[in-house]
């Protein structure tokens, strides 16, 4: 296996303004084409042979599709998109009221790009009500002793007293709620969780743990483990990308100076493990020459994190991360984006949801397919490059 190394990034091309617009136009047109099957229903988390099937609003991933609708609405102003977004917010309100599959920390993934976005863009009271109800459910998963929000499973499950790196993206929902209501409980919990996460998931070489356990009796940090990475101690590509975006979000909301070098280290580890075409394999231990699938979604997530952090850095460092993001998105737009709707109803090919290995604990599905967050974050990155974007997060 081999990686190109960060120095070689210098020679890679950046996406131009014109290319950004073209890619965003194509993505928005694909979203509009998908409104028919996916307004009353939602695309599944991953495609099968390039095509998403329809599902009810039951998975942790459905908010990404509504987020795509809002991004396309921002880009085009097409009222059909707004109407579809409103119908979907009704579904999210119903879901949280009936507590359908909401015993998870993924409430930020679900309610930020759907309902907070809809509220910010249209003033929807349905969106506001649904998102605030999700906030109450999310803080119910906070463990005072361990000072973290439990990721998965029932709160008394003996084997699940842990957080996962992905969780950092769920916290903007809590900051939004504090801003909206003036209730400091939400941001206080978010800040504690960010600190518990970033103090424990980043290893000395700046690779990251996917999941991290605490001692249920004392609340003390215990040990890291992977679920979706290749093995314990390797760096799951998407986990590293969640870490890049997560540290940027951590800095955005807390302004803790220590998170700047942490972001730089986590981003640098990711960049040092890119293959020739800049789209990571599903685990960063793999590189060119390995017969392994890619996770294109990790490139989009990392690009969004770099574009977010670039806002807070000084001139040269800001330009560096913005430039890298443009290179990652150029690679996706040129070689991974769907250009023919007859071949796929998604936006970006070659992503990996859950790849079983001899050493990990996950099941095998959604490998080398589109997935719905890969599509969403690709559009988010393009939108960030296209204009000064007000975050849904
Ligand atoms: N947040 C779950 C995943 O990235 O697969």
Image (cartoon, helix red, strand yellow):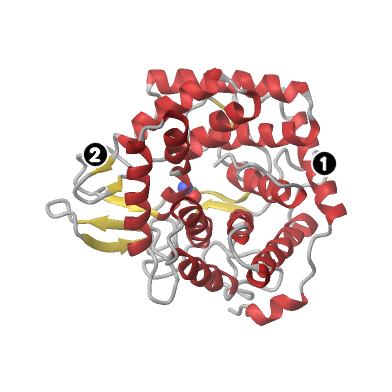
Residue at (26, 37) in percent of width and height: 154
Residue 42 falls left or right of residue 170? right
Give percent across and percent down for residue 231. Answer: 40, 66
Q: In which quarter of the image is the C terminus?
A: top right
Element class at badge 1:
helix
Give percent across and percent down for residue 113. Answer: 57, 36
User: How far apart in space, not on screen, are marks 2 and 1 (Cα)?
Assistant: 44 Å
Give percent across and percent down for residue 293. Answer: 59, 61
The verdict on label 2 being within 8 Å of ligand 1 is no
Residue 193 falls left or right of residue 318? left
Q: Residue 155 carries which label?
A: 2
Q: Quadrant of the N terminus?
A: bottom right
Q: Few, some or many C-alpha atoms within 10 Å of disc 2 (few <14, some 14-19, many ≥20)? A: some
- Does residue 190 show up? yes
Contact between labelled residues 1 and 2, with CB atoms less than 8 Å apart: no
Q: How many marks?
A: 2
Give the answer, above or below, for where 281 lies relative to 78.
Answer: below
Which residue ends up furthest to the left in the rendered image?
Answer: 217
Residue at (55, 61) in percent of width and height: 282
Foreground of the two, 196 or 83? 196
Q: Name the residue under label 1.
A: 25
Give percent across and percent down for residue 194. Answer: 38, 53
Give the answer, above or below, for where 303 lies relative to 55.
Answer: below
Compare marks 2 and 1 and give the one earlier in the sequence. Answer: 1
Q: Few, some or many C-alpha atoms within 10 Å of disc 1 (few <14, some 14-19, many ≥20)? A: some
- Does residue 151 show up? no
Which residue ends up furthest to the right in the rendered image?
Answer: 18
Foreground of the two, 303 or 187? 187
Element class at badge 2:
loop
The verdict on label 1 being within 8 Å of ligand 1 is no
Give the answer, above or below, for where 368 lies relative to 283.
Answer: above
């Amino acid at each position: 296996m081999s990686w190109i190394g960060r120095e070689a990034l210098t020679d890679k091309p950046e996406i131009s303004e014109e290319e950004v617009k073209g890619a965003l136009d194509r993505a928005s047109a694909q979203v509009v084409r998908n409104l028919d099957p996916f307004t009353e229903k939602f695309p599944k988390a991953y495609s099968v042979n390039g095509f998403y099937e329809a599902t009810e609003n039951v998975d942790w991933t459905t908010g990404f599709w509504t987020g795509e609708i809002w991004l396309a609405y921002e880009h085009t102003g097409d009222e059909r998109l707004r109407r579809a977004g409103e119908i979907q917010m009704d579904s999210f309100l119903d879901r949280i009221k009936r507590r359908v599959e909401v015993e998870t920390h993924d409430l930020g993934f679900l309610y930020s790009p759907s309902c907070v976005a809809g509220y910010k863009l249209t003033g929807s009271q349905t969106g506001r009500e649904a998102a605030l109800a999700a906030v109450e459910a999310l803080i119910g998963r906070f463990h005072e002793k361990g000072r973290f929000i439990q990721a998965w499973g029932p709160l008394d499950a003996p084997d699940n007293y842990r957080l996962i790196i992905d969780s950092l993206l769920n916290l903007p929902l809590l900051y939004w709620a504090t801003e909206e209501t003036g209730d400091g409980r939400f941001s206080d919990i978010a800040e504690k969780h960010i600190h518990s996460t970033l103090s424990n998931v980043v290893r000395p070489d700046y690779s990251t743990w996917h999941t991290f356990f605490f001692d249920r009796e004392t609340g003390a940090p215990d040990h890291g483990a992977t679920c979706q990475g290749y093995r314990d101690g390797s760096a799951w590509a998407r986990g590293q990308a969640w870490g890049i975006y997560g540290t940027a979000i951590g800095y955005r909301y807390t302004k803790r100076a220590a998170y700047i070098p942490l972001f730089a280290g986590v981003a640098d580890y990711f960049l040092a493990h890119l293959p020739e075409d800049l789209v990571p394999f599903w685990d960063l231990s793999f590189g060119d020459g390995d017969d392994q699938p890619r996770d294109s979604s990790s490139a989009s997530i990392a690009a969004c994190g770099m574009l977010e952090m670039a806002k807070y850095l000084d001139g040269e460092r800001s330009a560096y991360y913005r430039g890298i993001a443009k290179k990652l998105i150029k690679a996706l737009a040129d070689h991974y984006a769907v250009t023919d709707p007859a071949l796929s109803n998604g936006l970006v090919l070659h992503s990996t949801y859950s790849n079983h290995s001899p050493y990990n604990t996950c099941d095998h599905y959604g490998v080398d397919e589109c997935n719905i967050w890969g599509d969403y974050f690709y559009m988010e990155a393009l939108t960030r490059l296209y204009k000064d974007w007000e975050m849904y997060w």
